[in-house]
Structures are given as structure tokens and as C-alpha cells.
Image: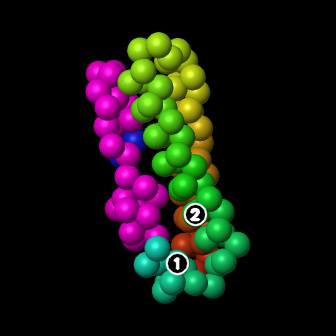
Amino acid sequence: MKVEGYNSFLTGELVNIMDHNSCRFGSWFNHASKTILENSRQELSTIAEEHKKVHSCLQSAVSIFNDNAQNNSQGAELMERVEAASKKSFEVLLSVIKRTSH
């Protein structure tokens, strides 16, 4: 999904960004949060929040990249937020997995 955002920046093509529940990670996460990760509520909340931020920032960036009147630097800043939110969510997820696997 992030690759689609970068492609939109490079090509100027409009791409459809799925909502945070419909992407592959969102589908997996919604299931895992009710089963294997259910004892990590605070961390799950952080992961969900950051994952939602990935989607919202990505959608905003794609909109900017497709509007020729917009300054692409704003889109690039949003892509930096996408990367930061993605990194944070996976760091928290990995810490939960490490803790629960012991």
C-alpha cells in the first residue's frame, strides 16, 4: 500500500488507498487483536492508532500528489509521517510478540 503512495508521487496517478480495516495488515490485526494479542490492550491501541495514521496520511499525500496546484513538499512531509507511524506500529507489535512468546 505504501508503494502505491510512492508510485502516485512519481507518476501523478490517482490511486485508491484502502481503509485501515481492509488492507492485509488491518485484516490480520483485527483478527489477531481478538485472539493471540488480546492481553496487550494498551499496545494494541497504539498499534491501531498508528496504523490508522498510516492510511490517513497516505490518502492525504496521494491527494496532494494528484493535484498539480499543490506543493509536493507537503505530500513528502505526509509520507514521512506515514513512515514514522508505520515504524512505530511495527516496533510496538514486535515488542508485544517478543513478550508473549516467552
Q: Nearer the viewer, residue 24 or 39?
A: 24
Q: Which residues are magenta?
A: 4-29
Residue type at mark 1? Ser
Residue in the image at 32% along x and 32% along y: 14
Q: Position of residue 49 (x, y in %)?
A: 62, 59
- Residue 87 appears in the figure: no
Residue in the image at 46% along x and 40% along y: 59
Residue in the image at 37% along x and 52% along y: 18
Residue type at mark 2? Ala
Q: Position of residue 10 (x, y in %)?
A: 33, 21
Q: Which mark is residue 18?
A: none
Q: How many marks?
A: 2
Q: Residues within 10 Å of mark 2 (few under 14, many from 20)?
A: some
- Residue 47 appears in the figure: yes
Please say whether residue 94 is one of the residues in the magenta stretch.
no
Q: Residues within 10 Å of mark 1 (few under 14, many from 20)?
A: some
Residue 74 drawn above or below residue 49: above
Give the residue at mark 2: 48
How far is disc 2 from disc 1 in space, using C-alphas? 10 Å
Q: Position of residue 53 (x, y in %)?
A: 57, 49
Do labels 2 and 1 touch, CB within 8 Å?
yes
Q: Position of residue 77 (x, y in %)?
A: 58, 27
Find the residue positioned furthest to the right: 42
Residue in the image at 37% along x and 62% along y: 22
Give the residue at mark 1: 33
Asked which secondary structure carries label 2, the reply is: helix
